Image: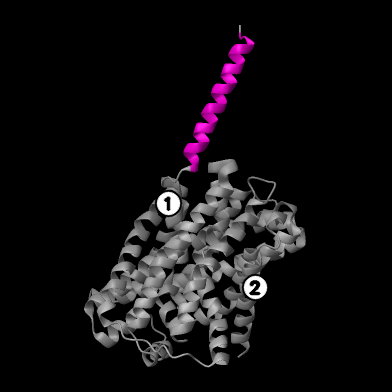
Amino acid sequence: MTTPLDATHSNASTQTHSSANSSAKSKWNLHDTQWTLSLFGTAVGAGILFLPINIGIGGFWPLIIMACLAFPMTFLAHRGLARFVLSSKNKHADFTDVVEEHFGVNAGRLISLLYFLSIFPILLIYGVGLTNTVDSFMVNQLGMESPPRVVLSGILVAGMISLMMGGERLMLRAFSILVYPLVGILFFLSLYLIPSWQMPDISLPEVGSFGKTLWLSIPIIVFSFSHAAAISSFVHVQREHYDDLAARKSEAILKRTSLLLIVFVLLFVFSCVLSLTGEQMAQAKADNVSVLSYLANITHNSFIATLGPLVAFIAITSSFLGHFLGARESFTGLVTKQTQLGAKTVDKIGVVIMFFAIWFCAVKNPSILDMMDQLSGPIIAMILFIMPMIAVYKVPALHKYRNRLSTLFVLAVGALAVFALIYSMIK
């Protein structure tokens, strides 16, 4: 027979155990590290190889200012999107569920469709880019004959999608394997280039051109560090893993991801920019080649020529995995709400459709980079920066973040990014 004293002791024991368990979960652990690497890998795609040219061509002072703004722009925007997904009353809600809950069925489906369209073109780009990178490496570095494109692209795309089908544990393991060498190579290349640094032009530019350069550089920073495609899946996993601690743990992981991105990527950017003159960067942009390819060409450095394709392969593969995660989730959410099909059936159909679409695009090898940037760019800015901040004023669960400096900053950056992209497209 259980006495009141026994019951009290039992309850106290349960609370103590729960408190200890909560305290253990609040500490940084392997799960958090793996997700930091996953988000880092999603952000560091092929764009990093063009980032030094795109941002460095504007001059030294815009580069310095954008470097200072990179961390708050990256961290605050992704934290806002994570808070938006966490604001749902449904603990199992994905991105499509949350936008429907807060903005209504019709607006929710439109935003979900735009979200999918912002991610899917990037997968097409990566399918083409990965095939070209491996083909070039096999021909130029290994001295092999160029394999049939339809076979090579099919194997590469199928291999990457197979990693995603293996579940969260295999995906996180793949990210860990890919991202460590990526961080190491970026850091090593940054240090390797130090002896070739040159004194930059530090003269103050004319105010009007300086402001315009700074404004047009915002989208470059926004999209070079974007890991928005993986945020919904990331938050969903944290909610299941941490329950009430999900918001705090998500913020901690996002902060470390942003710091990791800023430290390693900006070190690489500065090292590359200081190794080239303004005329050389303009020439690299005109030639439409990555910064490592251009450095290898002008220095005839076989070391850089070998590492360049390796960095491109790792960066494209890791970013592909993160973007496929977002595209797969958004496709499933969209279709299940329009049909009577079950989520598992839709997921399998989506994977098959995306595989053949990416494979077809990789075989055709179209010149689609600029077009896709213009399609994905404004949509990513609206979804990552503007929509979560509008939700802060609309959704009761987010009202506590209203009128904060961080909210206004993210909203302003998002508006500037969208207008800059529209200006570039019209021009």
The secondary structure type at the circle numbered 1 is helix
Q: Picture coordinates of residue 386 (x, y %)?
A: 66, 68
As for residue 4 lying within the magenta part, the answer is yes
In the displayed structure, 414 sits above or below 170; it is below
Residue 148 visible, this orientation: no
Residue 378 picture quarter: bottom right
Q: Picture coordinates of residue 409 (x, y %)?
A: 62, 69
The residue labelled by disc 1 is 34
For the point 42% across and 51% down, the residue is 33
The secondary structure type at the circle numbered 2 is helix
Q: Which residues are magenta?
A: 2-26
Dot placed on the residue nearer the N-terminal end, 1 or 2: 1
Question: What is the three-letter code of the residue carrying label 1?
Answer: Gln
Pointer 2 local density, CA inside 10 Å: few below 14, some 14–19, many at least 20: some
Pointer 1 local density, CA inside 10 Å: few below 14, some 14–19, many at least 20: many
Mark nearest the camera among 1 and 2 is 2
Residue 222 picture quarter: bottom right
Question: What is the three-letter code of the residue carrying label 2?
Answer: Ala
Q: Is residue 357 left or right of residue 341?
A: left
For the point 56% across and 90% down, the residue is 207
Res. 412 mark: 2
Q: Which quadrant does the C terminus fall into?
A: bottom right
Q: What is the CA distance from the residue labelled 1 to the residue labelled 2?
A: 32 Å
Residue 287 visible, this orientation: yes
Q: Which quadrant does the N terminus fall into?
A: top right
Residue 415 picture quarter: bottom right
Report the predominant secondary structure element of the magenta stretch: helix
| Nearest to the observer: residue 411 or residue 364 | 411
As for residue 16 lying within the magenta part, the answer is yes
